[in-house]
Image (cartoon, helix red, strand yellow):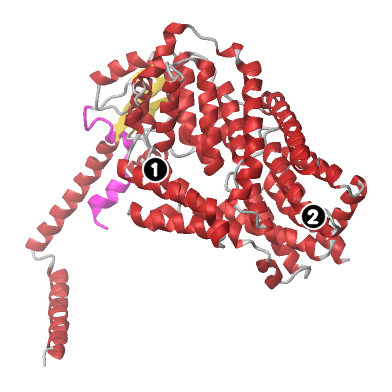
Amino acid sequence: MTEPVRLARQTRVASCQDILAIGPLLVHRDDDLLDIVRRSARQPATRTIGVIDDDGRVVGIIRVLRLTESIVARVSPEAVMVGIKDAVEVGRFGHAVEDRIAGDIMEPPATISPEATVSEAFREMHKHQVTGLYVVDAAGRPTGYVDLLELAIRLADALDEERRSNSDRASNGGGAASGGGASDQAPTAPGSLGGDATAEGP
Amino acid sequence: MQELLAGVVFLIAYVLIATDRYDKTILALLGGLVMILLGIIDQHEAFAAIDFNVIFLLAGMMILAGILRRTGFFQWIAILSTKIAAGEPFRLLIVLSFVAAVLSAFLDNVTTVVLIAPVTLYIAAALHVSPVPFLISEILASNIGGTATLIGDPPNILIGSASGLDFGAFLLNMGPPAILIFLAFLVTVRVFFGRQLEVHPEIRDAVLALDEREVLEEPRLLRISLIVIGLTIGAFLVHGAFGFEPATIALFGAAVLMLLARIEPSEVLEEIEWPTLFFFIGLFMLVEGIVHVGLVQAAADVLLDITGRQQGVTTISLLWLSGFASAIVDNIPYTATMIPVVRDMAAEGLAIEPLWWALALGACLGGNATIIGASANVVVANLATRAGHPIGFRDFLPYGIVVVVESLVIASVYMWLRYLA
């Protein structure tokens, strides 16, 4: 493993959260869903909305998809009904047609500490099926927001750096050993293919 | 000694299934296999007891319903029926119950109630009324509708296969009481829910805005599914005359639909509820254990002693016993156990057909008594809780008990007049 990749594995969330201009969007449990939609539309890149209590702690999250589902279900329920297959989905639909405030549709909070690594943040996003996490302090108050894409960009930078340093090493002659390895293998593969072709030819 | 062992294994499995603490499929399978391990029956006898006519009829119908489910048909018909009711809540309750009853007579009850529930929940929300009266009525109607045909409810499938009575015989004998009971049910729900469902005329229009065409996903698949299912049901009507078993008809229909639907078989076969099928497999082996040692024969003798071996008393007693037993325990294991009992009763000289109808009516209708009495009840309770409108055991019980008692009274009068007078 090269140095840039090794370092990337230890990258902290705190160093990623400000790469893109995707900030937190915080609402209260009693906020009306229609108001939340309008606020969300002003900040469209934030796909996970945070719900905070009176002390400012994150007590839940709202996914934009779920928010939209609740609005659509009130106007055009047929669109949400399509594809319902089991009791769990029916239950969700039943909720959606009655949801009015943030508390109705919020899900358990998906948060991460700024000290957590990028891979831990990714696992957390995967577990909660969200594209962003609220970065919180020890008391559970949000200090920032980290988006899936910020994690990806941080790691992509490391991979780019690795590629660059590899090609530098190759052009400086440092890659003699690996180049030799490749030239050892090169005649073997075509040779064996050619052998097969010859065997079949006559 | 063998009798005692078999009785204890059966009783433990039965009690554990009834208490619902462990998965019933695993319990039934383990119970059947323990019968083999203890040497009560050997593997050959256990496997020979598995009624593959039942297993494959269920599998075939699950495939047909599973494909139809993809088309949006259930929601389509539910929306269409709400338009007939023109936004009047009680009329909506009646038409949705009717749809639940008719669809349940031909398709799986759980699929039916689950897929008309979204429309129900939306309508209740739009009318600002509780969805609970609608959901309770749909459960009750679905179990009544399922009583009417051989393929409507699992107890009927079991009895149909064991008795050799065909689809037409079920329709002619179980259809009339099911219709009478459904009509009485409509009067009863009026008393139960009539007042709860009065809404301001202005908000009635909300449900009229629904467009049924928007829920239809695959029109081509819908047309094909309805044609194949229609032909399959048509074939059920005449299967007896051609000497085919219902499972052959159902599996043939399923295979043809899979071919025409052009869906990956693996995707369609995922729709089969394998736990239900393995539950039946386990039960057949479990019951064979107590049949083999003669316990079922003994139980039949005891029941006949109590009823004085009179046809009328025995038949009506079996109807009510089945009704109450199915309210408390799952009606599938109950029916599986009682089938050999009924056979033994007939061997003692009683006419068997009225006994089959008594068992079928009691087992199907009894499932309405409690929220855990039948699979459809349990699933609707689950989705209602998730939708924020829980239906507790006690919430359902008064409605369930009244409907079951009136159903059994009607069934008793019908049985008496048609078969016993």
Label 2: how many Cα within 10 Å (few below 14, some 14–19, many 20+): many
Q: Is residue B193 magenta?
A: no
In the figure, residue A81 lies in which quadrant?
top left
- Any part of residue A122 in sight: yes
Q: Secondary structure at mark 2?
A: helix
Is B276 or A202 nearer to us in this picture? B276
Tag 2, which chain?
B
Q: Relative to residue A20, is residue A53 drawn left or right?
A: right
The residue under the point 66% across, 16% down is B191
- Residue numbers of the magenta segment: A1-21
* In this picture, residue B259 sits left or right of residue B104: left
Where disc 1 sits, the SS reads loop
Position of the C terminus of chain B by quadrant: top right
The one of B78 and B389 positioned closer to us in this rendering: B78
Amino acid at circle 1: Arg
The image position of residue A179, as x and y in percent, is 13, 70
User: Is residue A14 found inside the magenta-colored segment of the image?
Assistant: yes
| Mark 1 vs mark 2, CA separation in Å | 41 Å
Q: Quadrant of the N terminus of chain B?
A: bottom right
Q: Position of residue B125 (x, y in %)?
A: 47, 18
Q: Position of residue A190 (x, y in %)?
A: 13, 79
Residue B191 drawn above or below residue A82:
above
Total numbered circles: 2
Q: Is residue A161 above or below residue B113?
A: below
Residue closer to the observer: B233 or A141: B233
Q: Quadrant of residue A38?
A: top left
Q: In the shown orientation, is residue B23 left or right of residue B270?
A: right
Which of marks 2 and 1 precedes in the sequence?
1
Residue corresponding to mark 1: B70
> Which residue is at a point 70% across and 41% down the rendered structure image?
B361
The numbered mark at residue B341 is: 2
B347 is higher (above) or lower (below) than B314: below
